[in-house]
Amino acid sequence: MTLGEDGYRLLGSQRQERGTALAELADLVCNTAREADRLHGKLRRHAAHVRDRIDNTLNPRVDPAFVPVTGLLTNTGHATDLHAARFAQQMNQLTFVLESYQAATRRTGV
């Protein structure tokens, strides 16, 4: 509840006031949050893929001769790091944008 009880409604109405700095900042909050949601979904899908790959590798019904002994996480581990780093970067950006928005709304008394 970073924005308070009416935060989402207020954010939406402020976005409609085109041509004001607060409208642009409200729009930036929404777009930054949307991108954070998209990246979170991408990270979750990737994590599910990695989990499935590990589950398949460790499946006791699979002949051990067909289980890779090296490189199990080489590509997926690197990709996981990249997805996680990009998501963390976006969340930091969202924090900064929200702080700026909150400071602006305090100054304007909205």
Image (tube, rainbow, N blue to C red):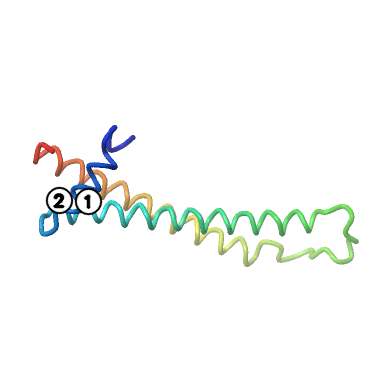
Sort mark 2 into few (<14), some (14-19) or many (20+) by Cα contacts within 10 Å: many
Please state the horizontal and vertical placement of residue 96, each as a whole percent of the image: 27, 48
Element type where label 1 sits in the image:
helix
Residue identified by numbered label 1:
26
Please state the horizontal and vertical placement of residue 10, each as a whole percent of the image: 22, 42
**Residue projecting furthest to the top:** 5
Judged left or right of residue 69, residue 4 is: left
Q: Type of residue at label 1?
A: Ala
Judged left or right of residue 33, residue 71 is: right
Q: In which image quadrant can residue 39 be found?
A: bottom left
Please state the horizontal and vertical placement of residue 81, each as a whole percent of the image: 53, 58
Q: Type of residue at label 2?
A: Leu
Q: Are marks 2 and 1 in contact (CB under 8 Å)?
A: yes
Q: Nearer the viewer, residue 16 or 103?
A: 16
Q: Nearer the viewer, residue 78 or 37?
A: 37
User: Which image quarter holds the C terminus?
Assistant: top left
Q: Residue at x 75, y 53 (%)?
A: 55
Please state the horizontal and vertical placement of residue 27, each as a whole percent of the image: 24, 55
Sort mark 1 into few (<14), some (14-19) or many (20+) by Cα contacts within 10 Å: many
Q: Residue at x 44, y 57 (%)?
A: 38
Q: In which image quadrant can residue 4 be found?
A: top left
Q: Nearer the viewer, residue 97 or 85?
A: 97
The tag on residue 22 is 2
User: Which image quarter holds the N terminus?
Assistant: top left
Q: Residue at x 67, y 61 (%)?
A: 73
How many marks do you count on the picture? Answer: 2
Distance of label 2 from label 1 (alpha carbons): 6 Å
Judged left or right of residue 43, residue 12 is: left
The tag on residue 95 is none
